[in-house]
Each structure stands twice: as C-alpha cells, then as structure tokens.
Amino acid sequence: MHAAHTASDSHIRLRLARAAFVLDVNLRLPGRGITVVFGPSGSGKTTLLRCVAGLERACDATDACVAMAGAVWQDAVSGVFVPTWQRSLGYVFQEASLLEHLNVRQNLVFGLRGGRGDALAHRGLQDAVKLLGIGDLLERRVDTLSGGERQRVAIARALARQPRVLLLDEPLAALDRSRKQDILPWLEALRDRLQIPMFYVTHAMDEVARLADTLVLLEAGQVRACGPVAEVMVQYLSAGGDEAGALLEATVRAHDAAWQLAEVVFDGGSFWLRDSPVLEPKRRVRVRVLARDVSLALAAPAGTSIQNQLACTVQSVAPDAHPSQVLVRLRCGTATLLARVTARSAAQLELAAGRAVWALVKSVALVE
Amino acid sequence: MPFPDPATQSAVLLTVRLAACTTLVLLLIATPLAWALARSRSRWSAVLGAVVALPLVLPPTVLGFYALLALGPQGWLGQLMHGLGLGTLAFTFTGLLMGSVVYSLPFAVQPIQHAFEAMGPRPMEVAATLGLSPLEAFWRVALPLARPGFAVAAMLSFAHTVGEFGLVLMIGGNIPGQTQVISTLIYGHVEAMEYAQAHVLALGMVVFAFAVLLALGAIQRHAPRSVA
C-alpha cells in the first residue's frame, strides 16, 4: 500500500445497491498513471466508473465521496453533488459514442468553449490530435471510420478539453484483436506522456499487464485488492492456473546481434530474451515471467542451458492448486517473482522464508 | 364561371394558412411534451401519453363538441377570452386553430417522441461528459439528431390538419372566407350536387396526400443513426 497520500490523490467512497451486486468501495488511488479496475462482467466496474463521472448517483453511503485529483465532485457530508457537465473529466465509452450528425473535426471541437470556428488552434486539441495520430481523419464522416479509428477520435475528443481525469470504460472491448493491437500503443503513449490520472475499466488480462500502474480487483461490487500492479498480480491473480506469474517493468539495455537476443534490466537483475524490432535501446517494456517457467537451485548451477539466473530470497511458500505443487514467492531486488515447484523439491531444498536461492528462468515473455 | 372561383381560392388559402399555423404551434408544444414522454419513466408519463393520444381514437365530433362548449360565449375559454376583451372564439380562425392543434397533437408528438427514444441516453451522456449543460445538450445534440422526427411531425401535422373535417364543421361553421376550408367546401359542393367542383378539389387532395406519404417514406429511409 502507499505510505502517504497527497492532495492530488483520489478518494472514492461509494455504495449503490443493484439487482446483481451491491457496489461498495472505498478506494484511495494515486494522482497519476493508469489505475485499471479489473473484474469479471457484472462485477460493477462500469457502474463504478459511471458513478465517478456522475452519470449515475450512488448515495447509499452516509459518507459517500468522490474526490478526483484534488476536486471534490461528491460529498455526502457537505451535500455536494457536482453534475457531470461541470466535472472536469474526459470519458470514453465502451462502444460507439461519436455524434453521427457531426464529422470528426466537429466531434473533436464539440466540447470546447465557444468551440466551432477556429477551435482547431486550441492547444489541448492539437496535442490530442497529435498524440492519437488522427490528423488525417479530421474531415471524415464518422460513419466511414473503422472501430479503432472511432475510439482514437473518442479518446482525443475527451482529452481535447484538457480534463483533470480521464475515464475509460472498456475502450477496446468492442474491437477485434488486430484493431486492439492497433490502439494499445496509443494508450501506452498516453500513460507515458499525460500528467493526469486515468481510470481504465477492463476484463481483459492483457490490457492489465500492458497498461496498469495501479490495479483494483473488483468482485461482485467489492474491492478484493488494490495496489501497484506487480504486487496485486502476484498476490491475487496467481492462485492455481497456468498463467500464474510475475509482471516486471524493465528497460532495454543491450543487444546480442550474433545470437538474436536482447537484454532487459529491472531492479533485481536482468534477462536475456528473444530480440524483436520493438526492443529499441532504453525503451521501457513489461515482461511476464510465468511461475511454471521458474526452477530453483541452492547454488548457481554451471553447465546448464538456462541463460537467466537470478539471486533471490524466498518470501513465502504457499500451497498451489494441486497438492503436489507449491507456489514460491521470491524477492529479487524490489521485484517479486513466482516459482512453481513440486512440494517434494520444496521440502528437499528446505525452502522457507529468508532462504537464499537461485531462480533459473527458462522463458521470459515480452508483454505486447 | 371562372376557375378557380373565389370560394375555392379562399378555401385553399385558408386551409394552407390553418395547416401552417397549426404545424408551427404544434412543433412548439409537442417538443417539450415528446421529450418528457421519451425521458420520464413515471406512471404519470403513461397517463400523459394516453391523453396526448386521445384524438387518435375519438371521433372529431366529440372534440368539436367539447371545443364548441369551451370556446362558446358560455364556455370557460370563451368567458376568459371575453374577459380579456378578445371577443368570442367559436366560428373564428383562432378558434379553428386551437381545435386543430388539439386534433393533430398526437401526429406531432409521437414522431418526435420516437426520434428522442431511438436516440437513446448515450448522446446526452456524451454531451454531459464534454461539458455541455442539459439545455445546451438539448439544442446541440437532441434536436439535430431528432431532425427526421421533426420533419415527419411537421408533415403529418400539416397533412392531418388539411384533412380534418368534422371538427372544422362543428367549431368553424363553414363560413366562406372565414372558416370554410377545402374539406368543408367539398362537402358543400356535394350537398349542392356540384360534382364537377367537388371532383377538382377531391382529386387535388388525393394528389397532395400521395405526395406527403412519398416524402415521409423518403425521410424514414434516410434517417441517420445517432452515434457511431
């Protein structure tokens, strides 16, 4: 959890009874980066986002409160409820939301004050158009755009007003896989360049792995976990399942052209992985290390085919889905790794909290 | 006898004037009514919807009868107008206009209501998240998107007013030059066995009605979706 909160942090305390669930949350979130709200359909993710935007009103709680990046939008104690149109926010809807009676340019300037004539000169709009690469689409009718282009225009339209917060409700859910791949890099660019916090609702794990800084797990309207993405993923999304693993932020350091490998470095060591054109020097990337691809040894082994060996400390040993296996949490620098080994080897190696081990990583996947 | 004879001329002009004024008044009244009916989910909106739709099923003579009672010198509306020094309304153009507005109300409200409903809540939400007040959003989003509904409402109101008969006869009294419209003039011609004149006007009405229906079909084919 975060040690201290600043004035620009966000606080969301809401309660709203619905037929399928009771949304009941009390969240404190950092004032920048992407906070992903992740959960299955019907867990209340979209309702939560709509309540934050004021599109729905959740006032079941006597201490209901929405404070976003320093602005109080709802406060049951002082009776404040700012209507949506007076909140400084950008909202991207899941499906079609471009106004059909306007073209792309008119949609973009729609929310700008006095915004019809020369509003294209508007600073925020120019930045948004550039950031999302839609300069060539301005005079197009919206019904001639592809799904991916529409969502990029919708995001640019939301950003053009230079809002305090950007709210995105499953913006990629209606897109097919390749369109999704088209638009993800633009979202990464937003995360890296924008100064404002973003709240991003999704039920797609790949979007979490790629975009989240902070992760909120929502289940049946309740918050199951909330914290930095790597921690929450290791802690809560790892029980059982082949996909259990760790997510690491790393930077590309070196290339081995002869063997077609690239080295990425993270706080705790480095990995060699298969080279790829996207691995430009110094680029920030995310890599996923699956628990089933990590073996453990008490000493650094010689004569092994495994290229990636990391010195770690055991943090905990937990039972896995099958009784023959355990899930070992490892501390490696400030990062956390997971290893899935048999219970017998855990006993033979006397694995317990505090023990120093070598993690032998067979495979590292670039998240893209 | 020269054609068109003065009676026909004045009846056609009066009909067009009555239909145009009725349409104008109706669009002003029907827009807020349609918005309320499309947005509200309370049980009062169902009652309001039924009241608006009444003229669809009531015989025009019933409307005409009540209108006559209300507008006449003893009626509450007549008394009110008299008190305001505006004279009586029965057998005048203004009285006819008021009756027509009630008579054609559902033809104006329902197409606009359907257009607002077809739009769904999303465009207004989009407008709100872009910082438009509800009133601004209504002007800049709801009205433009409901344009086909307004076109249909205007055409139906106009055509329906042109085609009214029973009500006009009851509160207008078929006074040439004042309240005699095409439909009542045709009635007069037939009564007087002037089939030739009746034919000309009747055929004109058929052609007009056909053109309106063709145009309505064209509007409905080209109605756009609201968001993409």
Image (cartoon, rainbow, N blue to C red):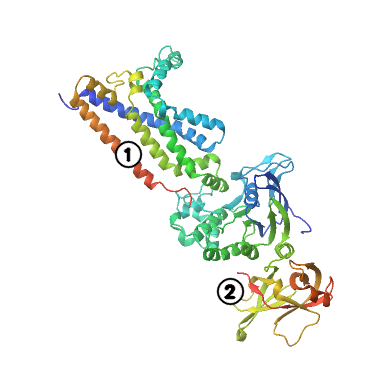
The answer to whether B82 is drawn above or below residue B158 in the figure is above
For label 1, the crowd category at 10 Å Cα-Cα, with few meaning under 14, some 14 to 19 and many 20 or more, is: some
The quarter of the picture where the C terminus of chain A appears is bottom right
Report which residue position mark 2 lands on: A278
Q: Position of residue B87 (x, y in %)?
A: 39, 15
View extreme (top): residue: B74
The answer to whether residue B17 of the structure is visible from this angle is: yes
Q: Position of residue A66 (x, y in %)?
A: 69, 47
Single out the mark in the foreground, 1 or 2.
Answer: 1
Q: Position of residue A251 (x, y in %)?
A: 67, 73
For label 2, the crowd category at 10 Å Cα-Cα, with few meaning under 14, some 14 to 19 and many 20 or more, is: few
The quarter of the picture where the N terminus of chain A appears is bottom right
Q: Amino acid at mark 1?
A: Leu
Q: Position of residue A216 (x, y in %)?
A: 69, 57
The answer to whether A248 is drawn above or below residue A16 in the figure is below
Report which residue position mark 1 lands on: B213
Closer to the camera in the image, A267 or A259: A259
Asked if marks 1 and 2 touch (Cβ < 8 Å), the reply is no
Q: Quadrant of residue A41?
A: bottom right
